Amino acid sequence: MKVAVIVFPGSNCEHDAEFVVREVLGQEAELVWHKDTSLHGADVVLLPGGFAHGDYLRTGAIARFSPVMREVERFARAGAPVIGICNGFQVLLEAGLLPGAMLRNRSLKYQCEQVHVKVEATDTPFTLACSPGQVIRIPIAHGEGNYYAEPDVVDDLERKRQVVFRYCAADGSVSDASNPNGSVHNIAGICSEGRNVVGLMPHPERACELALGSADGLVLFESVLRAVAESSRVAR
Amino acid sequence: MVFDEQLLSSHGVTAEEYARIVDALGREPSLAELGIFSVMWSEHCSYKSSRVHLKTLPTTGRRVLQGPGENAGAVDVGDGLAAVFKIESHNHPSFIEPYQGAATGVGGIIRDIFTMGARPIALLNSLRFGSLREPVVRRTFTGVVAGIAGYGNSIGIPTVGGEIGFDESYAGNPLVNVFCLGIARGDEIIRAAATGVGNPVYYVGAKTGRDGIHGATMASAEFDETSSEKRPAVQVGDPFMEKLLLEACLEAMRTDALVGIQDMGAAGLTSSTCEMGWRGRAGIEIDVALVPQRETGMTPYEIMLSESQERMLLVVKKGREREIEQIFEKWDLHAVQIGEVTDDARLRVKADGVVVADIPNEALTDGAPVYRRPMQAPAYLDGVRHLAFEALSAGAPGEVFRALLASPGVASRRWVYRQYDHMVRTNTVVVPGMGAGVVRIKGTVRALALSVDCNARFVYLDPFAGAQLAVAEASRNVACAGGEPVGATNCLNFGNPERPEIMWQFAQAVAGIGAACRALDLPITGGNVSLYNETDGQAVLPTPVLGVVGVVEDAAKVVRRAFQAEGDAVLLLGTSRAELGGSEYLKTVHGLVRGVPPVLDLAAEAALQRLLVAAAAQGLVRSAHDCAEGGVAVTLAECCFDTGLGADVDLPPAELPAAGFEVVGTLFGESASRVLVSTAPSSREALLDAARAAGVPAAVIGRVGGSRIRLAVAGVVVIDEALDDAQRLWDGALERELEPASATP
């Protein structure tokens, strides 16, 4: 598997994602500069966390215009796996590859802490190795992770089971108390209608080794590894 | 003289110093030259009051790769790698404009680290504020925290630890000290020297504006009621720009086309040009007309003195310019040639070809004035060292315990560090709020333990002993995590050095640091001095903050402070003496900063730290936590909080300081060189044997388990709290102070 990690000016989690793919998973990762017009034959595209262009405008609002995004859109429309983490999720929202928008956390502060997230859909390339309803412990680190969409859009997301991750308590129960930032319906991550594009605010790449406190995030990377292996088997 | 006295005094230049300037130039200076001298000879840049004392510090050792004098120090941490680190203050700007002052403090220290060719991987900070009961202090506190978060989070360097202290003396003069550490290959450290006559000098990064002019001079004067008018002297930070600069500079350093590089920090273009020239025994000639400017009509004086952020000065090999330019262009940064290296050891500044300043580098650097300022022991010492116990009542232990857990000096810092991204770069093994911060070094099996510490009350009561205690505490915290302390940096925050009492505090503290560092074999590889921390004649508590770096040989064996398993034995290492002088107990319960600080036996301290490192490596301890503010009782509670395991201990009574104070002295006394450890029952005897062999007193005082924190003294239970209740007090205390409306009870 080869993962293209897109680097915008101001990205700051690109090395973390690259490290997991290379050192933990033993797969190939390539940092792709945002001005690049090729994805270098990657099987998976990963938009990392950070502050693209400083996020001085709306988060992700400028990054969507980067030349590489045209390739990312083409890749996504072709049904290939794309994941946006944190700032990468915000870029996917701005690019229109996923619906909705981000508001400031209801605390009005940046929050960095471990949270629990429930896997609500296991039919995406990034969750197929999860068990339905699996609770994983991974960190968040954001100031604008309060997911919002118009009620009809949220209804649509729920009906089409596009909510992939939901903030929950350690026992999997979902309530306002387990919602760290005020996201509508405790939404932590969603997928596209085609299910191949996934965006989430928590950082699975920060939870791939027990030495760092949790390895619960690794299942997302193992999932896509399996998805890529299966699709290449089909192609053959 | 061409300048009147008022102009000189507004530049902070004395009549004697002016005479020296004329002497160095052989003529009267131009206005631009006066400005250049004034910033380079400011206390902030020249260390003119502190230099004679700093020279006494130990700065060498087998691991030291770079001592003081460069942008940062460096020590060998194995595998051919160097830890490059330094601590720096941004106190004065943070009072005037808390958010930007703190943010640009973070930006400045990060540049110092990557300038050396190191990738920054960790930040820590040491903060001091007045009482949170005052609205202005709450505003400063929240602004400083937000500023640190805003810059560090955006640039993507984790804040992995730190400390916060409170005392009324900081109300008008908060301290914001920021520590940064980076990793470089030991043989690829880049020095800030200009060499090679004819090599081009490049300016990269943000454009120059009028912000921060005379920032260094501002940082070298006391505050008064007009200080808020100095806001234009505070710079504005742009972490996004710095992120681009960081990546572009590290990329440029991987080529061999770069000769030297320095960040334009305090005194901006002035200090970077003359200091690079001086270090390279060369001269630099620049034309300010070539400097990218974001405002029109800037004079040479303003351009040379601007402290606009996120700018770097590069010396590039002649003929290799295009390579470097292309790297910066990739990152949408402009690299502009503004001059070249000359052979005359002078700083020559032109404006459209006309010379406006021409000064020997030496006059601006090593030739700056050095003062042996008069010193005198402060009169306050006679009074405050006496502690009249007979006038106090000890208080009920349970009530004192709860009051201490909820005091700002002790309470959980979660409200603060939750706002800092402390996990980015995926190296953070021990997160903030748990003693030393620990980051692994990718590509090796090692980790680094980092701690910044100072108990300023102890320093106030006895500067020599207090400074020694600060060294010991920072080093001990690193050792608790299993790190062998290998290097230190210091940030010395004091009042006005022109007052003999302050100068005496400073000299005593530096002597104390030197003595402790020699005893613990801990070289000081750099640091920063911040003087004139006074408002309306009221100086801050003398606060020499120590930052210590320790190497953990096996990252898998890092020791945490939290109890790990029910049934483990709890041991107290070290000697308890029921010392209450300068304690959190006296401050919180009686509102007093009095008495003498705890006794420090440096040989015992060294033995304790060696034992901690060895015990961690052998896996003999499951947790270790330094006894500091609040004594054994608070330390025990903190060991319980993180994992929710209670404890039951019985302490032998310490020697009594006064009748009626035996119990509080035993529970809350802050004797130095003590650590609370827990160990599996199967390792208990081995640990006791190791302690005996090391000459460290060790006593089994109880066991881990249950859901209560229970402390007895000589068999009599004196504290018996539900763990949940105690934790609630401790967890929410800062939030209750800062956000009274939204906090949960």
Image (tube, grey):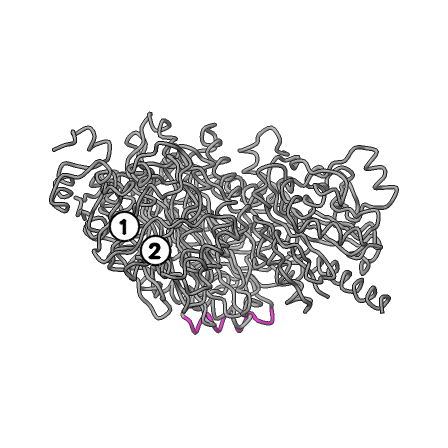
Badge number at residue B240: none
Q: Circle 2 is placed at which residue position?
A: B200
Q: Is residue B744 left or right of residue B664?
A: right
The residue labelled by disc 1 is B285
Q: Quadrant of residue A156?
A: top right
Q: What's the magenta bit mostly, secondary-structure-wise?
A: helix
Quadrant in which the N terminus of chain A is drawn: bottom right
Percent x, y of residue B386: 29, 42
Q: Position of residue B381 (x, y in %)?
A: 26, 41
Let me know if residue B692 is in the magenta part: yes
Q: Amino acid at mark 1?
A: Glu
Answer left or right for B346 relative to B664: left
Residue B393 in view here: no
Q: Could you give the CA–CA distance between mark 2 and mark 1, rounded to whole angstroms?
A: 10 Å
Query: Disc 2 is attached to a residue of which chain?
Result: B
Name the chain under label 1.
B
Q: Residue furthest right?
A: A159
**The image quarter in which residue B649 lies:** bottom right
User: Which of the pair B224/B652 is nearer the observer?
Assistant: B224
B443 shown above or below B130? below
Evaluate if marks 2 and 1 touch, with contact meaning CB atoms under 8 Å apart. no
Q: Secondary structure at mark 1?
A: strand
Which label's residue is closer to the chain start, 2 or 1? 2
